[in-house]
Image (tube, rainbow, N blue to C red):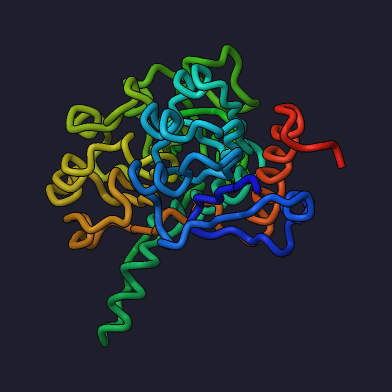
């Protein structure tokens, strides 16, 4: 019996038609029992030598993992990013890799907007003080009065741009991979965007080139009181430099949904001017259902192309 591994920390099997077809075809499904992101060794052990396909989360899929999974032929990422997958190693081991770039886009864009509004209106800070018996009258800011700098104009970045424009904000962007920006969005060099934006929101994949894209030097270029939002990938932000910029007053607020190490247990937990969420960008019911079904359909079609499944 061939094995399918689902390594994401949560995944609905019963209401997923493509997965049900795989079960009817005799596939055995093994899930992630840890309820968190797997380590390299944990995912290698879970895959073993009898797995033919997997639905992957954001765990590291490395040369070591692929070399130890001799029968693996299809990796279907449940999500947009592929930075956790060694694509060169996958090709070398004859493993097809797919993703679901469109499915989570609206959910992540809406969370980003929520983080922006919460930071501007100090919603989380006010809530904490009210629960502590205070009656704070904290003055916030209007999104309509801000310049929003979006770094990365892919599926998510473009949605965030439209959402911010609908509030009346001015939107600028930096993306070296596009030649033409959406209507009303001004393309800028990165240094100019950092210097002119009131809010900087990250929407690009992680790579060695983008590691700590926002570091101490970047924060120094920003306006005093600027707001940084990261719902993309943790490695894009130097978290130690971010803590220093928040504590010094250089940055007014930050909001992070992603971290270099997850679960996050670092010093930002003690900062009052940062909003922290637990990598929930795609965890909107409608988006998650679509993403899981698309990931399973990609897996099914990949196994058919590999000759390991008949077309149902």
Residue 219 visible within the image: yes
Comparing 156 with 14, the one in front is 14
Q: Position of 113 compared to 305: left or right?
A: left
Residue positioned most to the right: 312
Query: Where, by quadrant of the figure, is residue 197 drawn?
Result: top left
In the image shown, does 270 or 165 lie closer to the viewer? 270
Q: Residue at x 60, y 38 (%)?
A: 52
Position of residue 73 in the picture relative to residue 134 (left or right) = right
Residue 267 place in picture, x, y as percent: 17, 55
Say which residue appears at 55% left-offset and 55% top-offset.
30
**Where is residue 304, by image quadrant?**
top right
Q: Say if 226 sits above or below 29 in the image.
A: above
Count all numbered tags in the image, as a single digit: 0
| Quadrant of the snapshot with the C terminus | top right
In this orientation, which residue lies closer to the viewer: 145 or 251? Answer: 251
Residue 62 percent across, percent down from the top left: 39, 31
Residue at 36% x, 30% y: name it: 64
Indicate whether 227 appears above or below 91.
below
Q: Residue at x 60, y 47 (%)?
A: 3
Q: Position of residue 73 (x, y in %)?
A: 60, 31
Q: Position of residue 189 (x, y in %)?
A: 39, 17
| Res. 168 in view | no
Q: Quadrant of residue 295?
A: top right
């Amino acid at each position: 019996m061939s094995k399918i591994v689902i390594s994401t920390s949560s995944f609905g099997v019963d209401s997923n038609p493509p997965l049900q077809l795989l079960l009817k075809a005799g596939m055995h499904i093994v899930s992630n029992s840890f309820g968190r992101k797997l380590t390299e060794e944990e995912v290698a052990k879970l895959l073993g030598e009898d797995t033919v396909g997997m639905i992957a989360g954001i765990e590291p899929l490395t040369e070591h993992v692929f070399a130890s999974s001799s029968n693996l032929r299809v990796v279907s990422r449940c999500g947009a990013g592929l930075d956790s997958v060694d694509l060169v190693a996958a090709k070398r081991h004859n493993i097809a890799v797919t993703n679901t770039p469109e499915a989570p886009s609206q959910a992540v864009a809406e969370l980003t907007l929520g983080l922006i509004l919460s930071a501007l209106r100090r919603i989380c800070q006010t809530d904490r003080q009210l629960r502590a018996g205070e009656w704070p009258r904290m003055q916030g800011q209007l999104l309509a009065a801000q310049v929003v700098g979006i770094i990365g104009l892919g599926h998510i970045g473009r949605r965030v741009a439209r959402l911010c424009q609908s509030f009346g904000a001015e939107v600028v962007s930096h993306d070296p991979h596009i030649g033409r920006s959406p209507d009303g969005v001004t393309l800028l060099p990165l240094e100019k965007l950092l210097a002119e934006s009131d809010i900087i929101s990250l929407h690009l994949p992680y790579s060695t080139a983008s590691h700590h894209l926002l570091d101490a030097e970047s924060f120094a270029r920003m306006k005093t009181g600027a707001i940084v939002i990261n719902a993309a990938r943790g490695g894009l932000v130097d978290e130690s430099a971010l803590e220093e910029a928040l504590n010094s007053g250089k940055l007014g607020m930050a909001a992070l949904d992603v971290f270099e190490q997850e679960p996050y247990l670092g010093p930002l937990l003690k900062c009052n001017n940062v909003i922290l969420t637990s990598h929930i960008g795609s965890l909107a019911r409608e988006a998650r259902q679509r993403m899981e079904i698309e990931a399973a359909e990609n897996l099914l079609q990949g196994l058919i192309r590999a000759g390991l499944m008949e077309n149902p």
